[in-house]
Image (cartoon, coloured by chain):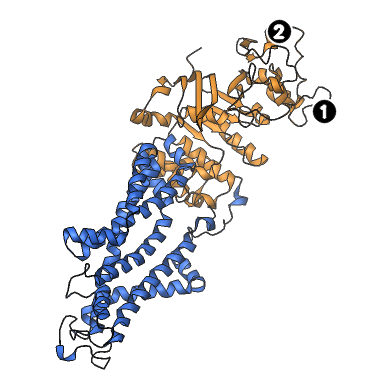
Chain colours: A orange, B blue
Amino acid sequence: MSAPLLRTRGLTVDYRVGRGRLRAVDHVDLDLHQGETLAVIGESGSGKSTIASALLRLVPVAAGSVEFDGLDWASLRGAALRRERHRMQFVPQDAGSSLDPRWRVRESVAEPLAVAGTSARQARDRAAAMLDRVGLEGPLQERFPHQLSGGQRQRVAIARALISKPRLVICDEAVSALDVSLQAEIVNLLVELRAERDLTYVFITHDIALLPYVADRVAVLYLGQVVESGPARDVLVDPQHPYTQGLLSSLPGAHPGGGAERPVRGEIPDPANPPTGCRFHPRCPVAVDGCPQVEPAVVPVSPAHSAACHLLEPRSATADPAVPLPSSLLRKARS
Amino acid sequence: MTTTVDTVTAPATPRAEGLRRALGRWRHEEKAALVAVGVLVVLVLVAVFAPLIAPHDPNAQSIADRLATPSATHPLGTDDLGRDVLSRLLYGARASLVASVLAMAVAVLVGLPLGLAAGFAGGIVDIVLRRVLDTVLAFPAIVLAIGVTGVVGPGLVTSMCAIGIVFAPSVARLIRGQTLSTRERLYVPAAVTYGSHPLRVAVRHVLPNAVAPVVIQMSLLMSTALLAEASLSFLGLGVQPPTASWGSMLGQAYGYMSQAPTQVFAPGLAIVLTAYCFIAVGDALRRELDPRQQTF
């Protein structure tokens, strides 16, 4: 296989909290090939958005390497970094606040081109064409962000992200703030644009129900660590980690028969003070002796699918069988 | 395009309204401020056209007519050197208005970049700038102006520049606080992700969104500067004789309060009225631009 478009090894991000520090992202390895969509899922506080900020070089990377599009991305600095930033763009959750309230949306969309030195007229024309493409036409382009609906603002944010012809687009909860019918529209738009422009996505979401529509690969994040990753179908159909199993079983309608329902209980622990051993053990329904002491290794389940759980090491019958599959997901994932 | 349903008009905001509609609203909600604007416009016209409307030469002395009470020839009487008070009042508007604009401009030109730099750069730049600004802020404006005129010599421009520099920290602190909160808006990191230079982000995104309270502050500074000019000229450190300013007129009339008590009223009322107008406009702008009333 060719070299991945994005490869992180040991990506670590620390935040300073008072005098101490909080490890928001802890040695994360991700691989993403051109044209694929990698979904990063997890609860609030799992470090999903911090990964996005680190990849976008908005927060400092404490350790680890990031290779992106043939560049040593994590070590670029200053003007060199600014010149290359157009290769990776992002679509935020809150498109409204990501647009300057004093700028007409077409001006906001043209700005990345203006920054890159494109002439004003050309930037303007291309911005108009881009907005047309994402479905925001005519006089709507002359409006201010507060005069548009949530879905329209999201289209503007997408147009601004794509105008500079990026290789990789990071969608950080890009549709989470929208209602369900709009979500479908925007997701469809993103999928269309991916094919049309040969894009690669990192799709960060807490909404597992979206995964079958967008994701080729899934990485499940818990307290800053990847606990399971693999092809979307494998992870959704045959989740290996108890946390992934819990997340999937929390989907409404996943268990019409009841029985094996085993949603994740409790709250995510304080990331400033993570549990010892396996970080999931306080909430794990199948934790055994040793889980609180020993950090589990990443175990390959198949060549592309791996998870970090002690129970997987022997792959024995002592491990609980996987949660019965949510039939709705199964259908979608196989389609 | 399937979302046309929700494209109907969003609620109007101060930003979206034209100037005309805003003024139309002021006619109902901000009558005092509108009157104040009118008075200030008249004052500017008076200052500009003083030579045309003044009945006498403001500096022409007539000892025989000194300290005359108001009459047809001298509607506001004459001062201790027999000069026409009305004419001096009209000419004095020039010095007083120029002084307040000058001090305000110096305060904004010095304070705005410093405050923006402190808020946007943060870190050591912020710490150093804040120490310096706090030091200047601790200095009484009039005392510094007196000190400066003591070194450079009395004069309107030097004393008003000194006043402006003492005012600069208040502008800087205001814009620093605004910058800190504006910097947290998502459109700032968004601008970084497409490669904007930090200076471009500061000038194109942060400053325009942070500047509204400074506009309010500017009008209040002008009223303070007007009073400072009056104080300095009263002390003889502002405009130099025979040039008229309201402060210097007050200073001279003060010496003859027992003989001609009416002389202090003309310049005194002019100072009070103008300062009040600046404050009224500032207050109305504050209500107009208050971020809590904005819908975005």
Left or right of A89 on screen, residue A207: right
On residue A106, which mark appears?
none
| Location of residue A193 with respect to B249 vertically, above or below | above
The residue identified by callout 2 is A315
Q: Is residue B6 visible?
A: yes
Dividing the picture into quarters, in which one does residue A186 lie?
Answer: top right
| Tag 1 and tag 2 share a subunit | yes
Q: Is residue A197 visible?
A: no
The residue identified by callout 1 is A256
Residue B190, given in percent of the width and then of the height, sits at: 46, 38
Q: Nearer the viewer, residue A274 or A46?
A: A274
Which residue is depicted at the point 41% across and 38% down? A112
Q: Using the numbered discs, state the Cα–Cα distance from disc 1 to disc 2 in whole angstroms.
A: 28 Å
Dividing the picture into quarters, in which one does residue B91 lie?
Answer: bottom left
Q: Nearer the viewer, residue A229 or B102?
A: B102
Q: Nearer the viewer, residue A313 or A295?
A: A295
| Location of residue A278 with respect to B252 vertically, above or below | above
Q: Amino acid at mark 2?
A: Arg
Q: Amino acid at mark 1?
A: Pro
Residue A326, given in percent of the width and then of the height, sits at: 75, 24
User: Dot 2, crowdedness within 10 Å: few (<14), some or many (≥20)?
Assistant: few
Image mark 1: chain: A
Residues at marks 1 and 2 touching, judged by CB atoms closer than 8 Å: no
| Location of residue A179 with respect to B169 vertically, above or below | above
Q: Nearer the viewer, residue A130 or B49?
A: B49
